Image: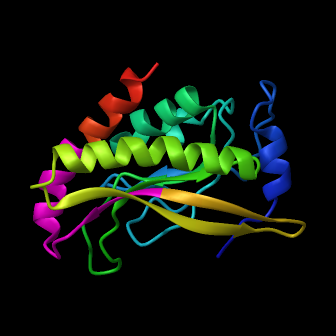
Amino acid sequence: MTYFSGLKEFIESWDDRFVEANPAEIFRQSPLGNINTEGTAACADSPILSKYHRQFKKSIEPGVRDLTIALIFKFNCITYSSCQGHFSTSKSQMRPRYVGILPRNINEYDDLVEQLTTLIEFTNGVLSQNTVEVVLTPDILESENCVMPCFNLFFISKSADEATYFQEVEAVYQTFLNLLTDRI
C-alpha cells in the first residue's frame, strides 16, 4: 500500500487543461538521470503532475517517457509514478523500469488489466530468451479521503545481474512500446 496525499484532487485535476502550477512541485535531475525532488539517486520522492501540467513531460525520466505518454494516449489512463530504471549506488538499491497506473474505477481497472495482459503475454512470448520480462503488479493507493486499487507495469529481471538487466531491458521495452503504439 502506498500513501498518496491529495489523491482525490489529483484524479480530479488529471483532465483539467487549465491546471495551475504549484510552486512546491519542484523536481531536479541527478547526474545519473534520476528525476525527483532532490535530484539524487537515493531520493524516491517526486512531484506527481497531471498530464496537462506544463512540466509533465520534463518530470518523466527519458527512459520511460515514451511509454508513459503512449499509455495515456492509447488507454486514456492516469499515470502517477514511473522510473526508467537505475543501477544501484552506495546510497540506493537498483531500481527497475516501471510505470504506475491509476484506474478511475473498477471497470477501467479490469479493462486495462485485460488489454495490458495481452500485450505483456505477447511481448514476453516473443522475447522468451530475454532475462527481462514485463509484469503487472497490483497495488493500492491510500489517501486522506479514499483508497483506490492501482497497478504497476514493471520490467523485471529473472537475473540478479544489474548489467544484464540494463543491457536487455531496452529490447523488451521497445517491443512492448511498439505493440502498444501499433494497436488501433
Left or right, residue 82 beside residue 179: right
Residue under the image location 29 percent in, 42 percent down: 122
Q: Where is residue 71 in the image (x, y as percent from the top left)?
A: 51, 36
Up/down of 1 relative to 55, above or below: below
Q: In which quarter of the image is residue 150?
A: bottom right
Q: Does residue 113 show up?
A: yes
Question: Which residue of the protein is positioned furthest toward the bottom in this rendering?
Answer: 90
Q: Does residue 90 belong to the magenta stretch?
A: no
Left or right, residue 138 beside residue 96: right
The magenta-colored residue range is: 153-172
Q: Where is residue 175 in the image (x, y as percent from the top left)?
A: 25, 37
Up/down of 31 relative to 178, above or below: below
Question: Which residue of the protein is positioned furthest toward the right in this rendering?
Answer: 145
> Foreground residue, 20 or 103?
103
Residue under the image location 81 percent in, 35 percent down: 20
Q: Position of residue 73 (x, y in %)?
A: 56, 26
